[in-house]
Amino acid sequence: MAEKKNPDPWAIPDIGPDTGEKKSESGADAYDATQWHEVQKGETLWKIAEQYYGDGNLYPKIFDANRDTLKDPNRINIGQKLRIP
Amino acid sequence: MFRHVYSFIIMILTATLLAACGGGDKGPAETALKAAEAAIDSAKGEASKYMPDQVKSLESALAAAREKLSKGDYKAVLSEAPTLTAKAQELASAAAAKKAELTKSWEGLSSGMPRVVEAIQSRVDILSQSKKLPAGMSAETLAQAKAGLNEITQQWTAATEASKGGNLMDAVSKASSVKVKAAEVLTLLKMPVPEALKS
């Protein structure tokens, strides 16, 4: 049985191509209230969740909102743009 | 005797002639006023919704013209009634333009605002599950955001109902209040404020 494990808060993000969603960032939609976060070196989903929600345990919220670009919560790329729900 | 009769006939003829001269304007004055009334009635339907003050002013001018007609001031009626007709036609065009403008505004708001509200709701729900709030956000701030969201939801429902009831003016006005409140709540939640909410 596949167990959903917490991402390693100390994991260094992979340096790879930016596969994040960009379309909504263009500003074309004047009502777009989506908050985006660009992954920095040393960040993890847990850290990002802590930054926006105050609680790293809520990282699955970010993972679920970015299922189109994230396959594994432990693998995020520097420069990748993540939707923060 | 003959002279008296002759003078009497002359007097009668003069009186008839004078009456005929004054009364000659009565028919055209009535027709002109009816045309003005018809034009105002026709414009009133839509204009009452979008330009009620102008409708009121036009109706006051029409009432004044009616009074002049009843007092026999036909020349004044003949002079004023065509102006009223023209103003009524202008009002109808202006009301149609206002309706088109409000319709466009409402279309933008009704397609955009639900997404903004959804984003706020999502963040409030997540923060409500958080054991500790993010840096710079207090429990009081979150409580304010929740109260704001509640207000937004109620006002948006009212705006939607106004639109369904055909009251676009009210719908856009309420939706504009929602925009202002939503911008406040987004700021409280440290979320980006969309461009449409900044104006």
Image (cartoon, grey):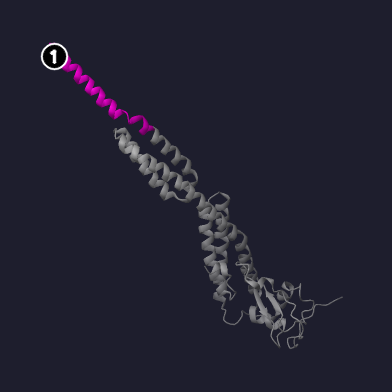
Q: Is residue B180 magenta?
A: no
Q: On the rendered structure, is B75 left or right of B180?
A: left
- Estimate the x, y position of residue B198 in percent, counting from the top left: 53, 69
**What residue appears at the point 16 percent right and 17 percent down from the top-left corner?**
B7
Q: Nearer the viewer, residue B153 or B102?
A: B102
User: Which quadrant holds the N terminus of chain A?
Assistant: bottom right
Q: Tell me if I can see residue B147 in this picture.
A: no
**What residue appears at the point 35 percent right and 41 percent down from the top-left corner?**
B80
Q: Is residue B139 above or below residue B159?
A: below
Are there few (<14), some (14-19), or many (20+) residues within 10 Å of tag 1?
few
Amino acid identity at mark 1: Arg
The secondary structure that most of the magenta stretch takes on is helix
Q: Nearer the viewer, residue B28 or B112?
A: B28
- Estimate the x, y position of residue B5 in percent, counting from the top left: 16, 13
Q: On the rendered structure, is B16 left or right of A25?
A: left
Q: Nearer the viewer, residue B53 or B156?
A: B53
Q: Residue furthest top?
A: B1
- Estimate the x, y position of residue B6 in percent, counting from the top left: 17, 15
Image quadrant where residue B40 sits:
top left
Q: Tell me if I can see residue B93 in this picture.
A: yes
Name the element at disc 1.
helix
Mark 1 chain: B
Residue that carries the numbered disc 1 in the rendered image: B3
User: Which quadrant holds the C terminus of chain A?
Assistant: bottom right
Q: Nearer the viewer, residue B143 or B124?
A: B124
Image quadrant where residue A43 sits:
bottom right
Q: Is residue B48 above or below residue B189?
A: above
Image quadrant where residue B63 sits:
top left
Q: Is residue B5 magenta?
A: yes
Magenta extent: B1-30
